[in-house]
């Protein structure tokens, strides 16, 4: 109901969060304008799209003008991303028929489909003239004490960072290296891993590594980063390791926490007590043990909710990450094997209000990049999980079927230690690939449907596995999900969902109220109903 003239909405002051305040005279340095122009000219691009996240729209016009004037090419701004801002929006770029795309700000660095050449501009919160003023003395001492035990043992330290804090992370590394030389002997120096953005062709970065030619070869790649052991004469250290992530001021509900979440869950070699977050703005080093445990508990709860779900929505959160179609088809086949109803949805950017329009669904499986896959808002009415979590849930419900020869080798297990957020790891050739028939086994003839007790509702749930005929039936033409013999089960679930959404009142008094006589209602147009004259005059209609 509108209770005013709407002037309050017009006069409302909107506060933009996480804005990156950059002076105009530093824009070209912070966002590598000269390097971008050189990349455009060297490759002969004529139409270039500049993709900016919301927090950088305040400087988008300045950057676009500088690039256009220096390159003499046509550039325009892509502001509102179709999905997550960390992903390259190739679809929007192709709509405008661009030759290349420049992506600014936070990036997940997922392997893209390769439709367009991409240049990543992470920006630097601290330019070269400002990093000399940074001091992390207290943080360096705490990290040193954590990696050097009283018995003389050492523990390797991994340095990761939000890409826009690369210069600040390099300052931390140099100060830590200097402190180690002063405080310990050579025998007690612990190994340090330095991380760099992992780029795959046709993507490139305009930012150069602060180590430049002194960067050792990479030992492994994880969570969009390559890791390099800085001591060339040291062998690969054995886990457990410690980790420090360098970033800015963030909260647990902000998007800025997603890169840190991704790093934590992608490195099971790092111990929970040995993970730290360094806030560059305040210089404070905090332990991330509570954050990790809270995250894993929350994901464990979502997996339990996934076990109860009978109506599942496959939510498409990217059209740019490579092989996203393959994981969608894999999830469809798994849900068919498990006898679950599913529907495919593409709604663009996610928010609780938009997804609240799907109350009939029990669960949403988000197909997105590794960082956006961890989307989880307390305001969501429907649980949102990753493909890995769905596979863990389906495998757990199906585990009591007597068709496994070896449960440990065939079952998708949730241990709370390894968390695969990149769906490409679950596909054939990935490090965590598991055949579909081992996640959800075939139902044997004459075998009763297995069941267990839900830890969320306390009710017994039955594992309704599909038969071989259901798996062989083609659903591509008619869009049907349930096989013909299971339509009754689907109708029962839908009717039950409708029943739970119906409001019957606090005291319905069924059969205790007199039957009301049907009367003719109002008809006409809103400006003048047929009974309006009678009502205004006070007479009965």
Image (cartoon, rainbow, N blue to C red):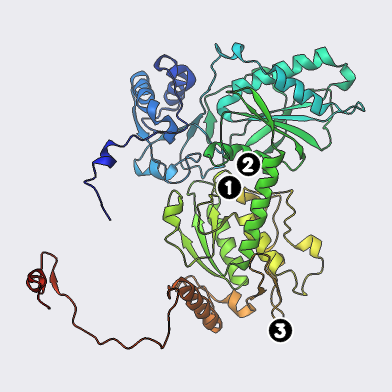
The residue pinned by badge 1 equals 374
Q: Residue furthest front?
A: 538
Of badges 3 and 1, nearer the viewer stands: 1
Q: CA distance from mark 3 to mark 1?
A: 39 Å
The residue positioned 42% from the left and 35% from the top of the image is 54
Marks 1 and 3: in contact by CB < 8 Å? no
The residue tagged 2 is 262
Look at the image and tell me whether residue 346 can be seen.
Answer: no
Q: At x 53% / y 30%, what residue is drawn?
A: 204
The location of residue 299, given as percent across then percent down, is 64, 53
Residue 245 visible, this angle: yes
Residue annotated with mark 3? 445
Question: Nearer the N terminus, badge 3 or badge 1?
Answer: 1
Q: Secondary structure at mark 1?
A: helix
Determine crowd level at label 1: few under 14, some 14-19, many 20+ residues with C-alpha closer than 10 A: many
Q: Nearer the viewer, mark 2 or mark 3?
A: 2
Q: Is residue 94 above or below residue 127?
A: below
Q: Quadrant of the C terminus?
A: bottom left
Q: Specify which label sits upstream in the sequence, 2 or 1.
A: 2
Residue 495 locus on image (x, y percent): 48, 78
Disc assigned to residue 38: none
Question: At 65% across and 61% down in the image, what residue appears?
Answer: 304
Q: Are marks 2 and 1 in contact (CB under 8 Å)?
A: yes
As measured in the structure, the alpha-carbon distance from the residue carrying label 2 to the one carrying label 3 is: 43 Å
* Res. 435 image quadrant: bottom right
| Viewer-closest of 418 and 95 | 418
- Percent position of residue 301, x then y: 65, 57
């Amino acid at each position: 109901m509108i209770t005013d003239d709407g002037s309050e909405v017009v006069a409302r002051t909107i506060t933009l969060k996480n804005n990156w305040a950059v002076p105009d005279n530093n824009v070209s340095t912070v966002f590598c304008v000269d390097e971008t122009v050189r990349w455009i000219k060297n490759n002969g691009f004529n139409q270039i799209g500049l993709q900016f996240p919301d927090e950088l729209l305040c400087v988008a016009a300045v950057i676009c003008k500088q690039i256009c004037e220096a390159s003499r090419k046509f550039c325009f701004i892509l502001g509102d991303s179709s999905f997550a801002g960390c992903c390259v929006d190739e679809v929007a770029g192709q709509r405008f028929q661009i030759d290349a795309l420049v992506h600014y700000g936070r990036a997940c660095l997922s392997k893209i489909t390769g439709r367009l050449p991409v240049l990543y501009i992470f920006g630097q919160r601290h330019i070269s003239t400002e990093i000399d003023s940074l001091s992390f003395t207290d943080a360096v001492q705490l990290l040193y004490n954590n990696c050097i035990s009283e018995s003389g043992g050492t523990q390797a330290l991994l340095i990761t960072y939000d890409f826009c804090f690369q210069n600040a992370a390099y300052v931390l590394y140099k100060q830590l290296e200097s402190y180690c030389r002063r405080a310990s002997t050579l025998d007690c120096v612990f190994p340090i891993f330095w991380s760099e953005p992992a780029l795959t062709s046709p993507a490139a970065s305009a930012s150069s590594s602060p180590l430049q030619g002194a960067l050792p070869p990479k030992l492994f790649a994880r969570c969009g980063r390559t890791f390099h052991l800085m001591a060339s004469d040291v062998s690969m250290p054995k886990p457990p390791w410690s980790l420090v992530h360098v970033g800015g001021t963030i909260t647990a509900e902000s998007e800025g926490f997603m890169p840190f979440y991704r790093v934590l869950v992608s490195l099971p070699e790092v111990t929970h007590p040995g993970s730290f977050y360094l806030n560059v703005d305040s210089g404070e080093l905090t332990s991330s043990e509570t954050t990790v445990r809270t995250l894993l508990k929350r994901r464990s709860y979502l997996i339990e909710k996934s076990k109860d779900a009978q109506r599942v929505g496959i939510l498409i959160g990217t059209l740019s990450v490579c092989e996203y179609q393959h994981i969608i088809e894999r999830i469809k086949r798994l849900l068919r094997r498990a006898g679950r109803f599913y529907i495919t949805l593409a709604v663009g950017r996610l928010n609780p209000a938009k997804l609240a329009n799907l109350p009939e669904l029990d669960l949403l499986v988000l197909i997105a990049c590794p960082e956006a896959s961890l989307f989880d808002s307390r305001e969501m009415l429907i649980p949102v999980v990753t493909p890995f979590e769905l596979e863990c849930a389906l495998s757990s419900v199906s585990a009591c079927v007597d068709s496994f020869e070896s449960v440990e080798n065939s079952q998708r297990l949730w241990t709370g230690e390894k968390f695969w957020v990149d769906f490409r790891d679950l596909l054939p050739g990935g490090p965590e690939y598991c055949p579909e028939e081992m996640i959800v086994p075939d139902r044997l003839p004459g075998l009763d449907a297995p069941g267990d007790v839900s830890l969320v509702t306390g009710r017994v749930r039955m594992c309704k596995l599909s038969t071989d005929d259901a798996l062989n039936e083609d659903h591509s033409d008619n869009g049907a999900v349930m096989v013909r013999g299971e339509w009754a089960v689907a109708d029962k679930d839908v009717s039950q969902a409708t029943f739970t959404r119906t409001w019957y009142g606090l005291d319905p008094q069924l059969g205790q109220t007199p039957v009301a006589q049907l009367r003719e209602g109002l008809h006409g147009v809103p400006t003048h109903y047929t009974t309006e004259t009678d009502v205004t005059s006070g007479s009965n209609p």
